[in-house]
Amino acid sequence: MTIKDLEGTYTIIGKNQDTEGQSYKGVLHLICKENNRLDAQWLINKTQEQSGTAFFKNDILVINFKYTGDDDTIYKGVAVYTCISKDLLDGFWSEKYGDQNCLGSERAFRILN
């Protein structure tokens, strides 16, 4: 698998980085850029936009992401996905101000046209 195989749009389901593990749904867009990088753009629960830059090696996709919270604070974190196939990504994530005793989780399923 190459980084270009991952370009596309995915439906996501996940759980937040907290003891309650509140679930969420959304969409993830991966767009190929130069230097073997991807731009990532999420829309979580139809309201929260997040963005990031990704790199890929040995079927592992790593995305450094950020978003602006409801309190106008910029939050940053990292998401790590195992690329099961070009159509299925299985990952976990953490952000700086999240509950450090927990990890968030996320699965991404390619939307086929």
Image (tube, helix red, strand yellow):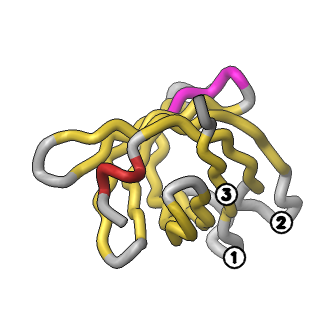
Q: In which image quadrant can residue 47 be found? A: top right
Answer left or right for 34 relative to 28: left
Magenta region, main secondary structure: strand
**Tag 1–tag 2 contact (CB < 8 Å):** yes
Residue carrying label 1: 101
User: How far, Cα to Cα, is label 1 from label 2?
Assistant: 8 Å
Q: Label for residue 19?
A: 2
Name the residue type under label 3: Glu
Q: What element carries label 3?
A: strand
Q: Is mark 1 on a helix, strand or loop?
A: loop
Q: Which of marks 1 and 2 is nearer the N terminus?
A: 2
Q: Position of residue 96 (x, y in %)?
A: 50, 59
User: How far, Cα to Cα, is label 3 from label 1?
Assistant: 17 Å
Name the residue type under label 1: Asn
Q: Which of marks 3 and 1 is nearer the N terminus?
A: 1
Picture residue at 50% right of the left edge, 67% below the top:
83
**Is residue 61 among what the camera can see?**
yes
Name the residue type under label 2: Thr
Indicate whether 23 appears above or below 83.
above
Q: Label for residue 81?
A: none
Picture residue at 76% right of the left edge, 56% below the top:
15
Q: In which image quadrant can residue 31 be found? A: top left
Picture residue at 34% right of the left edge, 78% below the top:
58
User: How far, Cα to Cα, is label 3 from label 2?
Assistant: 16 Å
Q: In which quarter of the image is the N terminus?
A: bottom left
> Magenta segment range?
46-50
Indicate whether 64 appears above or below 80.
above
Residue carrying label 3: 106
Q: What element carries label 2?
A: loop
Which is nearer the eye, 2 or 82?
2
Q: In which quarter of the image is the C terminus?
A: top right
Disc 3 vs disc 2: which is toward the camera? 3
